[in-house]
Amino acid sequence: MNRVGALGAAALGEALAHEACSVRRLNLNSNTVGPEGAAALARGLARSSALETLILHNNQVEDEGAAALAVALESPTCPLKELGLMNNGIGDSGAVALASSLVTARESDSLLSLRVLGLGANRIGASGAAALAGALGLGAAVEELNLSHNPQVGDRGASALATALEQRVSPEALHEEALHGEPFVYGEGLGVLYLTGAGVGAQGGRALLEALETTSLGVLGLLGNRGVEEETLKRIEALNLY
């Protein structure tokens, strides 16, 4: 842990925006960046041509900072592949903003490069999870999503994620649809979903198990959800690829 705050984050954001900056990974885990610092980093990210990984766990980013980062993700040239925002006090509005950025990038004919989105240990509930599910269903490029330790996700959020996995449309398919006017349903996409301690009950557990059985989902983390039936957990453990 260091003591990088908003001013330090602003300086780093300016450096990221410079055309000569070749930094590909920036880890600011456990600092005091805050919403203002996250917004400054987002401005740099939007102009960066190199940064692929940004880790901001434990930085009090909150909804305001998440929304600013979402704007950066909408840039068709954004190179980011991994965004880590665990334990930042992000709620449904921040999750909705991030989900909206994924949809906006798809609608603007951009193959968004973001592949890993870490949102564990925040304040995201069913509405935020459903928004992220909607983005996945529309072809967002995310391959790994972590919503662990958001206890308000619950059955509604879990069921929305399961439904999205079963009806997912790929970015490639969307391009084909535009070219040929023929919709394609894609069977690949999100491969890793972590929902440990997310308030999932029996209904949500069964829906996720069905998605694990019928889609490309290879890893489903569902421990720490007391409402999930034991038989469901056993079947999920047997199906997990690694």
Image: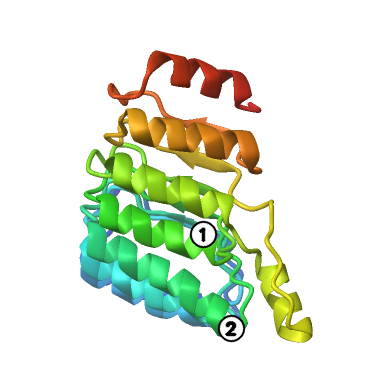
- Rendering coords of residue 34 (x, y %): 22, 62
Decide if residue 49 is on the left or right side of residue 1. right
Percent x, y for residue 234? 50, 15
Find the distance from the CA under tag 2 to the CA under tag 1. Answer: 32 Å
* Crowdedness near tag 2: few (<14), some (14–19) or many (≥20) residues, C-alpha within 10 Å: few
Label 1: how many Cα within 10 Å (few below 14, some 14–19, many 20+): many
Q: Which quadrant of the rendered structure holds the C terminus?
A: top right
The N terminus lies in quadrant: top left
Mark 2 residue type: Glu
* Residue 18 x, y percent position in the rendering: 52, 82
Question: Which residue type does callout 1 highlight?
Answer: Leu
The answer to whether residue 92 is above or below residue 123 is: below
**Residue that protrudes farthest toward the right in the picture:** 180
Q: Are the residues tagged 2 and 1 within 8 Å (C-beta)?
A: no
Instruction: Give the mark toward the camera: 2 or 1.
Output: 1
**Quarter location, residue 69:** bottom left
Horizontal side, residue 104 vs residue 90: left or right: right
> Which comes sooner in the sequence, label 2 or label 1?
2
- Res 132 quadrant in image: bottom left
Q: Is residue 105 visible?
A: yes
Disc sitting over residue 136 in the figure: 1
Q: Please determine whether, in this image, residue 222 is positioned above or below residue 143.
A: above
Identify the residue position indicated by label 2 in the image: 19
Q: Secondary structure at mark 2?
A: loop
**In the image, residue 83 above or below residue 176:** above
Q: Residue at x 23, y 70 (%)?
A: 64
Rendered view: 235 above or below 80? above
Q: Secondary structure at mark 1?
A: helix
Residue 20 % position (x, y): 60, 80
